[in-house]
Amino acid sequence: MWNRDRWVEIFETLSKNKLRASLSGFTIAMGIFIFVTLYGFGNGLKNAFNQFFLDDATNTLWVYGGQTSKPYKGFKSRRNIEFDNEDLDQLATDFAYFIEGVTPRITRAGEVSYKTESNSYSVRAVGPVHQDIEKSLVYSGRYINQSDVKDYTKNAVIGRLVAKDLFKYEDPLGKHVIINDVAFKVVGIFSDEGGDNEERMVYIPYTTQQRLLGGSEEIDQIILTFRPEIGYAGALQLESNIMKFLKRKHSIDPEDPAGIFIRNVASDLKQNQDFASILQYIVTFVGLGTLIAGVIGISNIMVYVVRERTKELGIRKAIGATPKSIIGMILHESIFITTIAGYTGLFVGVGTLALIGDNLEDFFIVDPQIHIGTAIFATILLIVFGAVAGYVPAKRAARIKPIIALRDE
Amino acid sequence: MIQLNNIHKSYNLKTNPLHVLKGINLSIEEGEMVAIMGASGSGKSTLLNILGMLDEADSGTYTLDDTPIVQLSETKAAQYRNKFLGFVFQSFNLISYKTALENVSLPLYYQKIPRKERLIKAKENLDKVGLGERIDHVPSELSGGEKQRVAIARALASEPKVLLADEPTGALDTKTSYDLMALIQEINEQGKTMVVITHEHDIANMCKRIVHLRDGVIVEDKKIKQVKAKDHVE
């Protein structure tokens, strides 16, 4: 392998058979290039998909109250179910082992103004955990915290676009905004990858809102995050346990399909992930197909190359080449070409993907990339198959009698 | 140098086996220059192939330079060919993409001789055949006679015991043929054993001994007075 003479011999052969060498090299490089770009595009598609569906936290349960559809324990049907702070506390203690955090959400429209600027926004009254659920990114100040909730503070966290609308170029932090005639101090500004609507929100402590709404302890909905370790099955189990718990507490018929609704993001997530993995299968299938086409291409070229060289190999045998040296020469040459060409195709492909970057975002291809391990594996696979494909005809050529080869004009 | 004892060779054709060599006994001493003559189908090419270890006899013994040539593996045959024999073919059989120098150095490559030494030796041999000035030309840039000289230089490069020439002048005009024979005679004068297959009488007469083959047997084996090719070249 490291015999210098062998290398010199190969370079001489290759440089004097440029057409042959570049033809087989081109096939390999093309194969790898197509594989890398297709696979990268597939991954880009997957990235776009993830960006669409997986922006919020995925380990969450959303609990809503509804209207019962069955009479139970002396209650009539069509009774409205509403949650309050007690439900919140009990969920947090009873399911402490499975739950990471619980937050209520009370959403009301709010007329928000600062100096002369005024606009209407959604005002969400929440607890600190809500930040994780929406993945709100607080880039200035802080989020609603536990002492806000405890002390009924009039603090507010506003979205990036709220700040832009009302404050223009002023720094909102520490200033006061009027929300539905009550002054709140801005303690934080956040951004959100979920889009413009998410950044036109105002968050305030839920206890403050409850007090402003007349001292009730009512909650529109409860959102809780569970520990990701419990997995998909655990999430489903948790969902059904919470359902049972709340139905018992609010005296709802366990068979009643209405009354309480729970949206489990875990099962949404499961569907999305299933779809994503089907995308992945398609990408892998296309990639494998390309690779197989590449392998067939190399095999054909190797058969042709050996056929074309039959006479030369006969001459070499007549003047003393052993079968081993013939096979070695052909293999060495083919591995050399496939390696150079393969890695050229690899780098050109990876370079192309890098150049494309996010330019094709409109076509749902985001950040197309190929895992470098996958790409190298594919290249090595092609090299190995190139060698195998060269070995069979090389062996046959090495066995052919020189006289027969020499007669071959 | 060469001893053949009762060599038989058949080819199995579809209908019936073709008995090509029917008991050949031949002994060639070192330094001889033997012409093997015969019409086509007489078995002379088969005999050459057996001598050249390109083919194997069905029965009989073959000894080359006191080495029995029997049941050779492909690898062994290749090594013996490289060590004992130099070939010159009618159709030259040079590698088309290699220069004269590279063609001549190829047998030395298979002897695993270092590159520098190889090129020096190849150059020497090309000088010997009078092509010292054309070492960088590829075969397509050489005339027929020059190609055959390159082939001879290549055959000599590995310093073989015996030079086997199969119709070496078959593709050349008369004048070029005589030039080439003069070269071959000169090499023979320096002590190299030669076996020349030919069907041309004038070429055969330039050897020192003629073996006539007909239908797979030797019908005549005589020493002759050698005609010097040089005398026919003006």
Image (tube, rainbow, N blue to C red):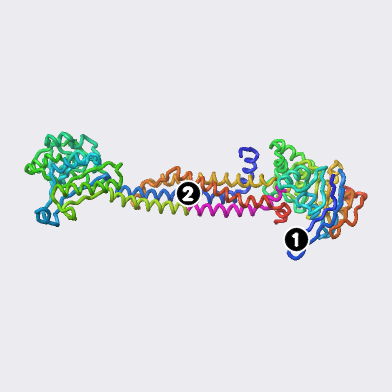
Q: Give the magenta range.
A: A290-317
Residue A255's tag is: none
In this view, the residue in front, A126 or B10, is B10
Q: Quick check: B50 left or right of A52?
A: right
Chain letter belonging to callout 2: A
Give percent across and percent down for residue B141: 71, 49
Give percent across and percent down for residue B29: 87, 45
Give percent across and percent down for residue B201: 87, 56
Q: Name the residue under label 1.
A: B12
Q: Nearer the viewer, mark 1 or mark 2?
A: 1
Tell me the crowding category of disc 1: few under 14, some 14 to 19, or many 20 or more residues within 10 angstroms, Cα based: few
Q: Does the magenta stretch include residue A337?
A: no
Residue A33's tag is: 2
Q: For the residues tagged 1 and 2, is the chain the same?
A: no
How far, Cα to Cα, is label 1 from label 2? 52 Å
What residue occupies the far front of the structure in this picture? A73
